Image (spheres, rainbow, N blue to C red):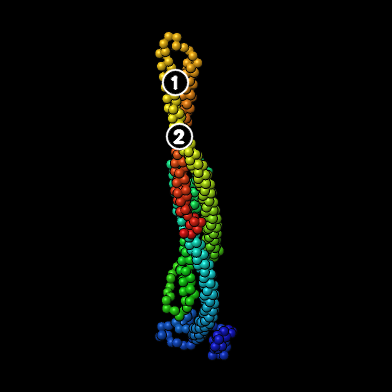
Amino acid sequence: MATATLLSREIPPERPVLKSESGSINNGMETAYTGNTGNNMGISTEGFRSARYNPSEWHESNYSKYYQSFVERDGAEKLRHESERVSNETEATTNKTQSEVTKKLNDRVQDIHFWKFELEREIGDVISETDLLLAQKKRLENALRATEVPLHIATDNLNCRQRRQGVDLVQDDPELSLLKEVEIINNVQDLLQKTIGQADAQIKQNRNAKQDLEMDWSDKKEALEIDTKCASLRNHHTHKQFYPGAAKFQEIQSTPESWAQFSHDNIVRAEHERMASIQLRTLIDNILEDTSRDMREQCDAVDVAYQKRVEDMEDAKTKLEENLHKVCDEISSQEKNIENLKRAIRDKEDPLKVAQTRLQNRTFRPGVDLCRDPVQYQLVGEVNEICQSVDALQAKLNDAVNSLKDLQDNRMSLEKEISCKKNSLFIDRDKCMTHRTRYPTTLKLQGYQ
């Protein structure tokens, strides 16, 4: 007999047991009526099944319907309970899974927020560092412009000193110092231009790194908004719908490791560029300090050379002027000497005339009175003496005239040399040294002004 299986404890129907009229249990065999049915009915009753069901078949049919109904109800009740169990289990599983997904979304939001914050911090650092590097580049440009003035001063000094005259057109210490100054300034300009190029390249690298960070930050911001919206989405919200085919993995999706590594690499790359920028700024500080010091030291060396040269020039000019004064005095004395010699020669004319006239007159003595007497000898000796004196005076006069000419030539040479010294002093002291007072200060050479 079947046992009850329904929760209602309903007992399954029992199979009916049939008894015959004689009291024996019917074994289910067909019974045939053996009584007198009459001959006029036209029905053969012996050896054939009756068209009607017998009671056992009727009971069996009813039992099968009862049992089939019981089985169907039992299966349906089991299905209801199983469905309720599965529904409860799936609801619990769905709620648990949704809670875990929500928790993972919140964790993901925290991860995105962390990397977004790190990206924001690095972006701020890169922007600040780029601004500092731009300021250093501005200093380099200011310093490069400031070198134009010293270069113009040194070039103008060299050109002005080309207008020195005579022996003063010498390659002296100031000129050598000026040439070295021009070389230093040209080297400084080349170095500053090269450093400006490095700064431009580093600024470009910083901006590229900043752009990568900003693109990553923008993606993080958008992802944060999306995941925050997803994490806050609940079953009772209305802004939800079916998206068939959404539950799949896209080929372009990254892994959590590659996702974190991507932002990490961007930050590391930006930090690398920022460290390179810091080192370049330090290098720029050192370059500006060294170049300004070199230029100022050479400027001071040129000024010292100029000062010494001016002192030497003034000393030479003073000595030349002293010699000129002495030569002028000597010229005056020599001119007086020439006048005295000429006067002395003129003074010999009358005695010579007297002596020669005496001799001439005595030639007219008659006869034997034309005697070569002592007077005659004395007069001849006197004439010869006077002529020798005149010759000696004339020789001295010629020497004096030549000496005067030499003194005058020397005076002209001294005057010309003094003029050259004055011209050189005007060029070095009044033009070059005055022009050099416009030399830029150290702060300007370092690009602060």
The reply to whether residue 273 is visible in this rendering is no
Q: In whole angstroms, how far apart are the C-alphas of marks 1 and 2?
A: 29 Å
User: Residue 164 or 202: which is nearer the viewer?
Assistant: 164
Say few, some or many: other residues with alpha carbon within 10 Å of mark 2 (under 14 / 14 to 19 / 20 or more): few
Q: Earlier in the sequence, mark 1 or mark 2?
A: 2
The residue that label 1 is drawn on is 355
- Could you tell me which secondary element the residue under label 1 belongs to? helix
At x 46% / y 71%, what residue is drawn?
A: 226
169 or 257, nearer to the observer: 169
Q: Residue at x 46, y 82 (%)?
A: 50
Q: In the rendering, at what x and y percent does residue 154 appear?
A: 47, 47
Q: Residue furthest top?
A: 367
Q: Which mark is residue 413?
A: none
Amino acid at the residue labelled 2: Lys
* Residue 36 image position (x, y, % from top left): 46, 88
Disc 1 residue type (three-letter): Ala
Examine the rendered structure and indicate whether residue 158 appears above or below residue 24. above
Instruction: Give the percent coordinates (x, y) of residue 388.
Output: 48, 22
Nearer to me, 71 or 449: 449
Image vertical order of residue 88 relative to residue 162, above or below: below
- Towards the viewer: 93 or 419: 419
Position of residue 171 relative to residue 29, above or below, is above
Write the residue at 47% across / 45% down. 425
- Count of labels in the image: 2
Q: Judge depth for marks 1 and 2 and give the one in front.
A: 1
Residue 10 is situated, as x and y percent measured from the top left of the image, at: 55, 88
**Label 2, on which residue?**
336
Tag 2 secondary structure: helix
